[in-house]
Amino acid sequence: MRAKAVITDFDKTLLRTDKTVSEYTRTVLQRCRGQGLAVMAATARPERSILAYRELLEFEAVTTLNGARILLPGGVVENALAPASVERMLEGIVAMPQVLISLETDQGIFSNVLIPEWEPVVFEGFPGLPECGRIYKILLSGPAGGLRETVRDSLTADAYLTVANGDLLQIMDRRATKWNGVKAMLGAAGIAAEDAVYFGDDNDDLEPIRRCGTGVAVANAIGAVLDRADAVAASNDLDGVARWIEENLL
């Protein structure tokens, strides 16, 4: 199969459910580099939470925060939300009962309640904003009734809404997409999209799966991704990305 780059999502795709990476997967990605394939990643995670994986797997470039911050060999591309837009959107959301609000920023994550898994700074001033330079993403969750509709009604023209893991609402600048991140990474490497293989599992992976030369869904992907993909690999817990690469590219 013709390919010059492999690009993979992290959670529920490359990583096992327990967030580990097998030695087999690490070895396969190392073999890719040995054969001249560029190895890249695209994730919803912030940079701080992928440092260990980046060091272990030696990615050439990484799209983080769904494209809000793109780490390239020659520098960083940022697609942050406009602060005025964030305040305007939060005005329509903050009154919702029991809604959990978090902001991913260049100063870490701020939330209106303590979320132990994320270890945020608790900020009770929404819809006002904490002291930070850039805001990359608004994260929202809470009771299902009406939240998604309220968020859609609150969106400004420069922002869009996507859903991860079935119920986590994410608001980002319209420029901040995984596909824009993939284009930037491939452009920096001088590789055409048709020469790239992309692996993913969730809504944010749909566009790169459709637009790259080969889009591969892991078996545990959501239905829309499975329907759109050119091929289906084994699940993340069976090292599906690495097995597909070994069987088709190496």
Image (cartoon, rainbow, N blue to C red):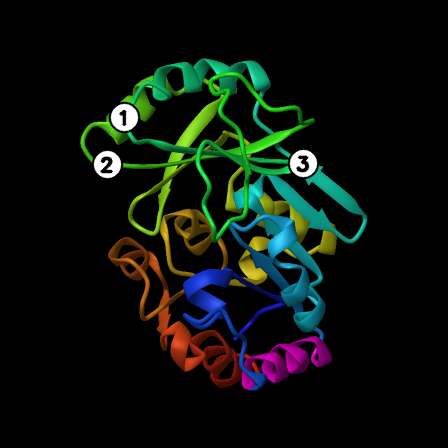
Residue 240 location, quadrant: bottom left
Q: Nearer the viewer, mark 3 or mark 1?
A: 1
Q: Quarter holding the C terminus?
A: bottom right
Residue 42 lies, with reference to residue 138, above or below; the image says below
Occupied quadrant, residue 42: bottom right
Q: Which residues are magenta?
A: 24-35
- The amino acid on which the numbered mark 3 sits, given as a three-letter code, is Gln
Residue at coordinates 27% horizontally, 58% vertically from top-left? 227
Marks 2 and 3, the one that precedes in the sequence: 3
Q: Which residue is mark 1?
A: 97
The chief SS type of the magenta part is helix
Disc nearer the start of the sequence (1/2): 1
Q: In the displayed structure, does residue 110 sit left or right of residue 164?
A: right
Indicate the position of residue 222 as horizontal and vertical percent values. Answer: 29, 58
Residue 237 position within the rendered picture, expressed as x and y whole percent measured from the top left: 40, 77
Task: Find out whether residue 32 is within the magenta segment.
Answer: yes
Q: Secondary structure at mark 3?
A: loop
What residue appears at the point 38 percent right and 60 percent down from the top-left corner? Answer: 201
Relative height, residue 177 to residue 208 (above, below): above
Are dots 1 and 2 in contact, CB under 8 Å?
Answer: yes
Q: Which residue is mark 3?
A: 107
- For image coordinates 61% across by 50% down, the residue present is 63
Residue 99 in percent (x, y) is at 33, 31
Q: Amino acid at mark 2?
A: Pro
User: Closer to the camera, 113 or 176?
Assistant: 113
Residue at far right of view? 74
131 to the left or right of 8: right
> According to the image, label 2 marks what residue?
143
Q: CA distance from mark 1 to mark 2?
A: 8 Å
